[in-house]
Amino acid sequence: MWLLFLFLVIAGTILAVVIFVIATEGRYFGKGLMRWGYNRRSGAFEVRDDWERWEHLIKRLQIRSTEEILDLGTQTGHFPRLIARQRGFTGHIVGIDWSEEMIQEAQRQCRLEGTGSRVRFLCHDVQNPLPFAPNTFTLVTVVTGLLTSLKTPETLFEEIHRILKPEGRVAFHIEQQPLRPTPMRTPEWFSTHLEPHGFIYSQTVRWTPAQQIIIFQKR
């Protein structure tokens, strides 16, 4: 009987740890488990019908035809690929994600769509320095759940400031999920954490009924 009890305790503990890692996006520990999970789900991300939502975001951000854009947490690259397909777009876009399978799927779709001259994808963990020279981009977007996986996002904010050109913009999405144990990123939170790193608030726009986009400009 005690063996059964011990087994149930161990199994319950493991299950609780897994649930905690997933709920917090690996913010405290379990990055390897999260990466494994995202790698297994790359195909599911690609078949999701998000194109209308991403098209709306392009309009809300007023993306210019010559923008140099970095999309952090790009997943399978829906947003960069759609920008690259816009008529008259002559700029360049880089999408970054830490999942090798997500990046491989993004690259495969990019080849099929013939947009390889305007967009490229890199596998990189944003907890490490971004592999770009200072003053490279005019716009940085963080419009997926990337921030929820970072315990201390301030280092990333410093890196974004470094790689943005003067008066460049950075856009974050705000989505309130009160039932999940993740930090509530409010407009006040963004202002408090971004202004000390050289940004000034620009505007907040509605993206979807449940999401907003908050935009800051490099000082």
Image: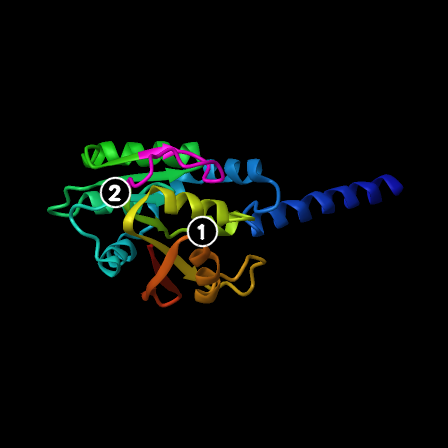
Mark 2–mark 1 CB contact (< 8 Å): no
Q: Quadrant of residue 164?
A: top left
Find the magenta span and give its range: 121-136
Image coordinates for residue 29, horizontal then vertical, percent = 62, 42
Residue under label 1, please give it: 145
Image coordinates for residue 213, horizontal then vertical, percent = 35, 61
Residue at left offset 18%, top offset 51%: 64
Residue under label 2, please give it: 81
The answer to if 91 sits in the magenta stretch is no
Image coordinates for residue 133, horizontal then vertical, percent = 33, 35
Confirm whether residue 73 shows in the render.
no
Looking at the rendered structure, the kind of residue marked 2 is Arg
Residue at left offset 44%, top offset 52%: 197
Query: In which quadrant will I find the N terminus?
Result: top right
Q: Secondary structure at mark 2?
A: helix
Image coordinates for residue 109, horizontal then vertical, percent = 27, 36
Residue at left offset 61%, top offset 46%: 28
